[in-house]
Amino acid sequence: MHQPLVFRLLLIFIVLILNACGTSTEFDNQATEGYSNAEKQKFAKYMIQGKSLYTTYCSNCHQTDGEGLGKLYPPLAQSDYMLADKERTICLIKKGLTGEIEVNGISYEQAMPGLKNLSNLEIAEITTYVYNSWGHETGFVRVEEVEKALRNCE
């Protein structure tokens, strides 16, 4: 009589383990719901490469946690300025920024150099990373979006 119970428990355990392993990546979030497996893999690739590029080009000022540096460099995490206009953010990455901006009610005047050497793909990867980190879940930023934004930069 104990054999069927042991078998059932073992079967339940195996199902739970297989379900826990699943096909998700560490980058799955609400923004990727509805993506095909190929799109999820591409999103994960953008996130990995975007994080590497962010670490190289952006984290010295904006910090690895996206919190910025006091009143010198603005945060990207929960940034009302960044979330308000993705195209503007794309332009800032490529062309830089001078002059005063207000982020989350605090004024910042430190210039941001443009990253003119980055390709549109690299800008898409960085932008995908920052728009899907630190509590943001806005989904993919495709190369086509970057191209369009850069054509419309002031």
Image: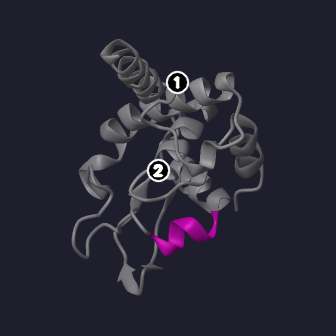
Q: Label 1, on which residue? A: 23
Rendered-image quadrant of the C terminus: bottom right
Query: Label 1 to label 2, Cα distance in Å?
Result: 24 Å
Q: Looking at the picture, which amino acid does disc 1 mark?
A: Thr
- Between discs 1 and 2, the one toward the N terminus: 1
For image coordinates 55% across by 43% down, the residue present is 128
Query: Is residue 84 a member of the stretch shown in magenta?
Result: yes
Q: Which residue is drawn at 35% across and 69% down?
A: 74
29 or 113: nearer the viewer: 29
Secondary structure at numbered mark 2: helix
Which class describes the residues within 10 Å of circle 1: few (<14), some (14-19), or many (20+)? few
Outermost residue on the bottom side: it is 105
Q: Nearer the viewer, residue 45 or 117?
A: 45
Examine the rendered structure and indicate whether residue 110 appears above or below residue 33: below
**Where are the magenta residues, as a range?**
79-85
Principal secondary structure, stretch drawn in magenta:
helix
* Residue lying at 51% horizontally and 50% vertically, measured from the top left: 93
Image position, residue 131 (x, y; %)? 52, 53
User: Is-magenta flag for residue 83?
Assistant: yes
Residue 134 versus residue 74 in the image, above or below? above
Q: In this view, does 66 lie to the left or right of 50?
A: left
Q: Which of 91 and 87 is in front in this view?
A: 87
Residue at label 2? 130
Q: In which quarter of the image is residue 123?
A: top right
Percent from the top left, x then y, of residue 103? 43, 77
Q: In this rendering, which labeled residue sits more in front, label 1 or label 2? A: 1
Q: Residue 117 placed where, x, y %?
A: 50, 33
Q: Which amino acid does label 2 sit on?
A: Val
Nearest the viewer among 95 and 42 is 42
Find the residue positioned furthest to the front. Answer: 1
Assess whether mark 2 and mark 1 are in contact (beta carbons under 8 angstroms): no
Where residue 75 is drawn, which disc sits there? none
